[in-house]
Image (cartoon, rainbow, N blue to C red):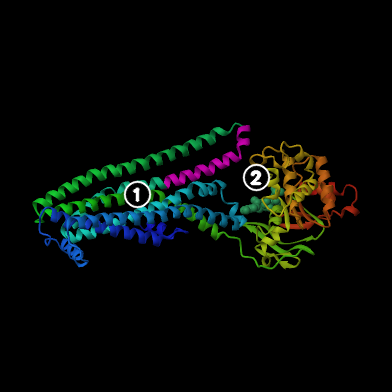
Amino acid sequence: MLSVLRIFFNAKGTNSWTVLGALVLAGLAEGIGVANLLPLITIMIGADTDASPLSRMLIDTIEAVGLSPEPYVLVSLIVLSITAKAIFTLIAMRHVGYAVAEVATGLRATLVGNLLRGRWSYFVTQPVGRVANAMSNEATRAGRAYQIAAECIADTIQVVVYMIIALLVSWQLTLLALLGGAVVVGLLGFLVRTARKAGLKQTNRTRYMVTYLTDVLNNMKTLKAMARQAAFAAYLDKQIAGLRKALRRQVTSTEALKSFQEILTTVVMGAGLILAIEVSAIPPGELIVMYVVILKLVKNVMRMQRQYQKAVLSESPYHAVEALIAESAAAAENAHGGAPPSFQQGCRLSAVSKSFGEHQVFQNIDLEIPRGEITVLMGPSGTGKTTLADLVLGLQDPDAGEVLIDGTPLSDLDLQSWRRMIGYVSQDLVLFHDSVLMNITLGDPTISEEDVRRALELAGATDFVAALPEGLSTMVGEKGGKLSGGQRQRITLARALAGRPKLLVLDEVTSALDARSEEELCTTLGGLTPELTILAITHRPQLLTIADTVYRVHDGQIAKSPVTTPSARRPGEIETAVATQSSS
Ligand SMILES: Nc1ncnc2c1ncn2[C@@H]1O[C@H](COP(=O)(O)OP(=O)(O)OP(=O)(O)O)[C@@H](O)[C@H]1O
């Protein structure tokens, strides 16, 4: 029950105290209505109204407000009370309705915010499918969990109200009824536990399945090309079978609870009635009212248990989203200073060391990226070139040493402003499933169509974009699948240039281009300096022809490669440099 209360009171964007207040008022109103049945029935059967303390108390109250305890007064009171109960319940559930939407959207908004603020190192450990599942399926179920928690609490309040009324009529019979109820609840408790397990299984299986499916879809071309779908399909079938079993268990356990409750309640109530008639000396009027009250009480206890079963069934998605929110909040990017960045001299890495776990990528390295020049990083695969770029972008933090921008540590600068000064082309040629235009502006309203056309021109993409069926509005397909690798590369370069950056960071920007396009692009890039500063990572020789400085990354160290500036370059120098790096 604690977990249900936690969901009810902790869910953000809800007005749980108002809901609780309205539910308590609804419970009280219903209590007054039902309690008035006692004097009504007592009068109707001509029994002594003084026989029960509750009956006497109600009649005294009615007389104290100047009314007489006539049947029409009592019936009117019952009608008024039940109407009030319905209105208060409606008020509570209207709030719950709003809250359900708030919980589902609030969880999503918090999760998105946390993920966007998260460290890159955290993000790369997160399967996309897990996040997608949390955003869609789990958040929706979590919103519903709030509603069920509220309904469960409403039922609990009603149980308490009926218990008080029953106690006022006969505490002995009430205790007997509660004992019977507790036996039924206890006997059927295993069905609640089964439902909880089935709910958890559904949540976990769905998460695994969506995560796995996302990976399969991302790699569909490779799987199809080599006809390797069979193993993946078998794994998915297994997960689907597990999910089917969990869903079947949920329905079976909820239906079984309902049916067993009905049987056991009838037995307990029957036994209780016989006991009351045979053993107790309760007057008939009171006995009828008592039966009505206790029947209601037991029914409410049973409904409360069914509602509780539903609540535990739906608590796992709520907790799953909460766990992801807490995890992503803890993985927020380190707080940086708020100093505005400038880029007049350039960027420098000073005595930087960086490890991933036990694996030391760099130890005490220095690197200069002077403003207005082209700095190229080369070296064998896996030696840390991308990690170096990530340090400059602030996506990774150094373990020791500093990244300095115009002499100021990056940790003192406003990181977002620094990144707004950068144009970045990543190694992955993945585009958004959207138009060419959207893929270039990334939704930034400050980038004009003029900026886009200029960027396309610089990236050598104007002609092929113009030839697309709908030009800039052409949809590029999933991950840009309707474009060739080279075309995607030009779009990503245009995207990097569209925001008129001060520093361009290019990770293997020519890898998908043919020799002629690569040469053309290098000429274009050479022409962008000195207005623009370029840090480029490459395995290919062409970029070296325009480089001012070439660094070779190797064995945790970085060294200036003996390649001179373009103007002083000797024949064969580039070929030697490339041969040295690929032989490492
Ligand atoms: N987030 C990470 N967690 C753990 N290890 C990582 C992470 N990122 C990179 N590495 C490791 O750090 C090393 C350097 O990786 P990096 O991607 O920087 O190499 P690279 O020189 O750019 O390689 P390539 O030329 O193949 O792109 C590799 O051994 C890699 O496995």
| Residue 579 visible (yes or no) | no
Total labels drawn: 2
Q: In the displayed structure, would residue 257 be above or below residue 411?
A: above
Question: Circle 2 sits on which residue?
Answer: 432
| Residue 360 visible (yes or no) | yes
Camera-side residue: 299 or 252?
Answer: 299
Q: In the displayed structure, would residue 516 be above or below residue 273?
A: above
Counting from the top left corner in percent of width and height, residue 505 is at: 74, 54
Which structural element holds mark 1? helix
Is residue 127 toward the left or the right of residue 573 in the image? left
- Label 2 Cα crowd, 10 Å radius (few <14 / some 14-19 / many 20+): some
Question: What is the quadrant of residue 331 in the picture?
Answer: bottom right
Is residue 460 toward the left or the right of residue 175 in the image? right
Find residue 309 and name its label: 1
223 in magenta:
yes
In which quadrant is the N terminus drawn? bottom left
Query: Are circles 1 and 2 on residues that touch, CB within 8 Å?
Result: no
Q: Residue at x 8, y 51 (%)?
A: 278
584 in magenta:
no
First to last magenta residue range: 200-225
Find residue 71 and name its label: none
Q: Main secondary structure of the magenta part?
A: helix
